[in-house]
Image (tube, coloured by chain):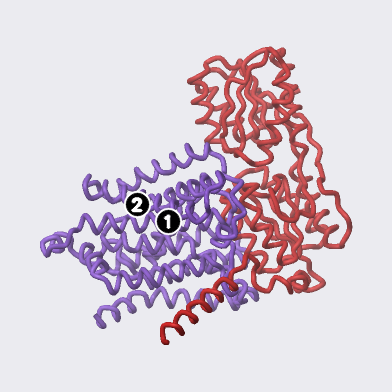
Chain colours: A purple, B red
Amino acid sequence: MKHKSLGEWMQTLGSMIGLLLIIIILSVMSDNFLSLGNILNVLRQVSINALIAFGMTFVILTGGIDLSVGSVLALAGALTAGMLASGMDPVLAVLIGLIAGALMGAFNGLIITKGKVAPFIATLATMTIFRGLTLVYTDGRPVTGLSDSFFFEMIGKGYLFGIPFPVILMGAAFIILVFILRKTTFGRKVYAIGGNESASILSGIKSDRVKIWVYSLTGMLSALAGIILTSRLNSAQPNAGFTYELDAIAAVVLGGTSLSGGRGWLVGTLVGALIIGVLNNGLNLLNVSSFYQQVVKGGVILLAVLLDRKKSA
Amino acid sequence: MRNWIKHVALGVLALMLLVGCSTEPPGSDSSEESGGSSGEGEKTIGFSVSTLNNPFFVTLNEGMEKAAESEGVKVQTKDAQDDPSKQVSDIEDMIQQKVDVLLVNPTDSAAIVSAIESANDAGIPVITVDRQADGGEIAAHIASDNVKGGEMAAKHILEKIESEGKVVELQGIPGSSAARERGEGFHNIVDEEGGMEVVASQPADFDRSKGLTVMENIIQGNPEIDAVFAHNDQMALGAIEALEAAGMNEDVVVVGFDAIDDAKAAIEEGRMEATVAQQPDKIGEKGIETALSVLNGEDVEEFIPVELQLVTGK
């Protein structure tokens, strides 16, 4: 066990050094980068992608992929906003929103396991379905007029002892998920399925059931991200979360998790999400044109995939 | 006994957590000074624009840059790429950069509010440009008189088709104030006219490719169309492509909004009837002027309209 985690540290070492380098360069080039205000600002911006990417890590560890996360985010956010706008109790609305996200994820898992559809294709289809349902539900308009509930405002806009609440949610999710992946049999099964699915089935692991749970978990985390975004924007946008799956996958891959499954860890994903967030923020502070920003971001993702290929070769 | 201590400790912890909750950013009381901390000499104006993937905003941005240059101030432009959450991040980044004043062209009127509130908390004045915000403290709003523009377009259509026929409305991003106001102006005129029927009102989000597909779909359902009013030229040009593909362009009067170069060329070629010209460079210019007035502590009007004009072939 000790050995294994050492190997993972090595895998993520490159990204960690990369993150450190980016931070050093940016703090030299911009006076405002290392201010406490900006650090909290970056962490808050990162939290949404990180939550999705944590779920994506589980999915990718099983050897799958989930392209529907951005659409789940939008639909769960819109449903929650709709319930709030109609005057439902905010705690209940958020809970139902989370459960709805989990159910969408479970639907993905069922198609993949029981329908034996490749995850890429299955979630490509549900990505379109969930986005379409969001547009149907919202009538293509942003859902506004949410309640002024303190609880709901806290989720996206609040602070706990000066730390933005989304960052706290990200931290809590991180600790719980690391525990699940490291210390529970469920976590070990996730690794086993991704490592060698047929061997894991032979050794008695109910791989279908594990996978359905994994996709449900991702759905719920995407829904949480959607609810945070809805609270921050004080409205649910029908086109929210568009292309977020790419940022999440990029964070996972940047963190050293192998796209072929079985190898990887959540610390790496957190580092990956931080790299993407710090890059976005830093390029903004340095006044790099947004057109170039896209080129840089794409370049970093490409680099990550190339590194991944090198590792699995 | 131990249990008793545990309970008290838990209670205290819960209380602390509750007390720690707040929707105010830390240090927001001392924020008044932060506005001036970027030095006296050089003033920086931040401009968050909904998208630079639209020539209208490119021209607006150029007008702004030109005015800033002649006034000797720096303007920084951040392109939100039509993503409300990216726009919020952009604005937060500019607050961290301590710009002196913020010009904001919201992607979405509702979603922008939290970002504007953050700027308010940091003591940075906010001026909205072209599209309005639903909340927060706004020093001024600069825009074309869109309602009047919609009315101008509708009147021109009535004149062309002699107040009788079927007209299609291609709407901008639903909820955006430009879409709302142009639509309002259009309906003010058209709905009064008994002979006019609006056969379809559909959003194509100010986007050319969506204008094309939405128009294609509308043609399928309504083969007889006399006029199209699009809330911007991008959608009008998309609609023209659809009409040409269906062989209908000859008989349909298409009026757009914004007078971008492509639209003016299409009017020259006779492919498009007219467009309502906003003057984006003037809006940009007014933006810088107003920003400087606000910085100098002068009083500014809440709404600063920029005039419009109808552009036709003749």
Residue B177 falls in image quadrant: top right
- Which residue is located at x 64 percent, y 14 percent? B165
- The x, y position of residue A2, in whole percent, is 26, 83
Q: Does residue B188 appear left or right of residue A130 in this picture?
A: right
Mark toward the start of the polypeptide (1 vs 2): 2
Specify the amino acid type for callout 1.
Ser
For mark 1, what is the residue? A222
The quarter of the rendered structure image containing the N terminus of chain A is bottom left
State the SS at label 1: helix
Which subunit holds the residue at mark 1? A
- The x, y position of residue B25, in whole percent, is 64, 68
Q: Is the residue at mark 1 from the same chain as the one at mark 2?
A: yes
Of residue A221 and residue B311, the one placed in the foreground of this image is: A221
- The x, y position of residue B213, in whole percent, is 50, 31
For mark 2, what is the residue? A105
Query: Which numbered circle lies on residue B170?
Result: none
State the SS at label 2: helix
- The x, y position of residue A140, in whole percent, is 53, 38
Badge 2: residue crowd in 10 Å (few <14, some 14–19, many ≥20): many
Specify the amino acid type for callout 2.
Gly
The quarter of the rendered structure image containing the C terminus of chain A is bottom left
Residue A282 falls in image quadrant: bottom right
